[in-house]
Image (spheres, rainbow, N blue to C red):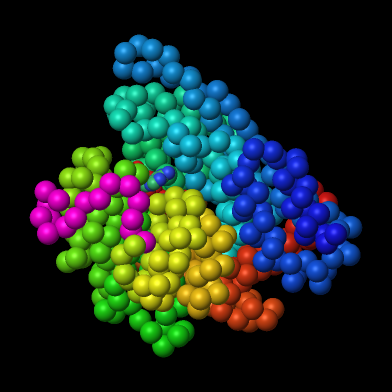
Amino acid sequence: MSYVDEVIERVVRENPNEPEFHQAVKEVLESLRVVVDANEEKFRKDALLERLVNPERQFKFRVPWVDDKGQVQVNTGYRVQFNSAIGPYKGGLRLHPSVNLGIIKFLGFEQIFKNSLTGLPIGGGKGGSDFDPKGKSDREVMAFCQSFMTELCKYIGADTDVPAGDIGTGAREIGYMFGQYKRIRGVFEGVLTGKGLTYGGSLARTEATGYGLLYITQEMLKSKGMSLEGKTVVVSGAGNVATYAIQKAQQLGAKVVTCSDSTGWVYDPDGIDVAALKEIKEVKRARLTEYKNYRPNSEYHEGKGVWTVKADIALPCATQNELGIEDAKTLVANGVIAVAEGANMPTTMEATEYLQKNGVFFLPGKAANAGGVATSALEMSQNSERLSWTFEEVDSKLQGIMVNIFHNLDDAAKKYGFEGNYVVGANIAGFEKVVDAMNAQGIV
Ligand code: NDP
């Protein structure tokens, strides 16, 4: 049995009930086969892949808090510190009822390669809790965040592990967590990113993931002699990534006709109204059913459906496994040119392969949504030098990073004979740097 197959089998056997983690490991290791096969003897002897798929350390902890009725609630908190070969652990905190250890491990594993691809010195980690901020009062969210950080603060720090936002963790949650960290540890340091602008946050961090997604999509289209100008785009999600992806796509001359949330989706033939979307989701924290009040010409549908709308470009920006094989077939039948993942692993492996086989340009999340973590690393740099850069400065660095990422993965794909396969290109480009650093640091 090949080394790759052996390690995949071992991961499945030793981590039962973690299907998302298995999926992420399989996807990455399958695409690294060409590199691993060429170095099989050395990698095997060093147990390189076993070390790569085993987190350096992981924490699971109780998070008790009191709700508005005086009832004690108990959630579970996680932090997985996956790989620090190239820098302090870096990765978001997800607050969503679906969170479990397998999901955090899949995200942490992917984060290693994503962070490497940015070219910045950040290792891979991820955390979160099964707490659902939806429907909770501000006081309840604060009580949860304070309890969560009371435990988490023992394991993180500006030079060891720097968490950020993710699904369910926005500016409000980061603020409460930062306050509690400072109170307990007694230090004002850049221990979290995605902070508010008045206490160490970076301009353009809010926009970074969505903007970065469009910068890399634009660079990929440019390499094919195309552009975003005049293209029709379908987007899923209505959160941080989706909102700023829609905004930047429109600025670059495309028309975005859909968005969605966990209960339904919107079709707006005139193009999504970003100001309305922000008011509904960021200010009112309401459902997309409200969108029709702002745009009477739009349609609201219950359930899933954005991938049924005819478009040139599809940008999944909600959550994992939201674009399956049937969706991929519909997109191809409707003539889609490119799919770029704003979310983490939103496309199933089967759907990804189908899209690639049918000539669709496919940019995987670990490259396409790396703008968020890259800008988080820029926030760390600003915190370290106790300075704040202008929006334009951060945005132009972000553009440079995304353009570089595209060329790195394009070159890696070409070098190993997989021209145009950006999944293989991204995994190899991310992997090579991490492996080099791991080898240099000995067996640790
Ligand atoms: P948000 O919480 O801001 O938004 C998530 C959106 O997706 C919401 O519209 C939400 O609906 C919807 N959603 C969440 N879970 C589900 C589900 N199970 N089924 C259907 N819809 C769902 O999160 P972000 O925009 O920050 O994150 C979106 C994705 O992007 C995630 O995969 C995240 O890991 C990834 N990502 C985020 C980065 C960032 O900087 N924020 C960086 C890199 C990746 P509702 O409004 O109903 O809650």
Who's the residue at 42% across and 83% down the image? 222
Which is more toward the observer, 3 or 159? 3
Who's the residue at 38% across and 36% down the image? 173
The answer to whether residue 43 of the structure is visible from this angle is: no
Residue 112 point in image, percent of width and height: 62, 55
Who's the residue at 58% across and 26% down the image? 61
Which is more toward the observer, 189 or 101? 101
Who's the residue at 63% across and 65% down the image? 427
Q: Residue furthest top?
A: 70
Is 160 positioned to the left or the right of 339 in the image?
Answer: right
> Considering only vertical position in the picture, is 372 above or below 89?
below
Q: Is residue 129 magenta?
A: no
Residue 67 point in image, percent of width and height: 36, 18
> Considering only vertical position in the picture, is 226 above or below 437?
below
Residue 178 point in image, percent of width and height: 43, 36
> Considering only vertical position in the picture, is 38 above or below 287?
below
Number of callouts in the render? Answer: 0
Q: Which residues are magenta?
A: 292-307
> Considering only vertical position in the picture, is 360 above or below 441?
below
Which is more toward the observer, 170 or 364? 364
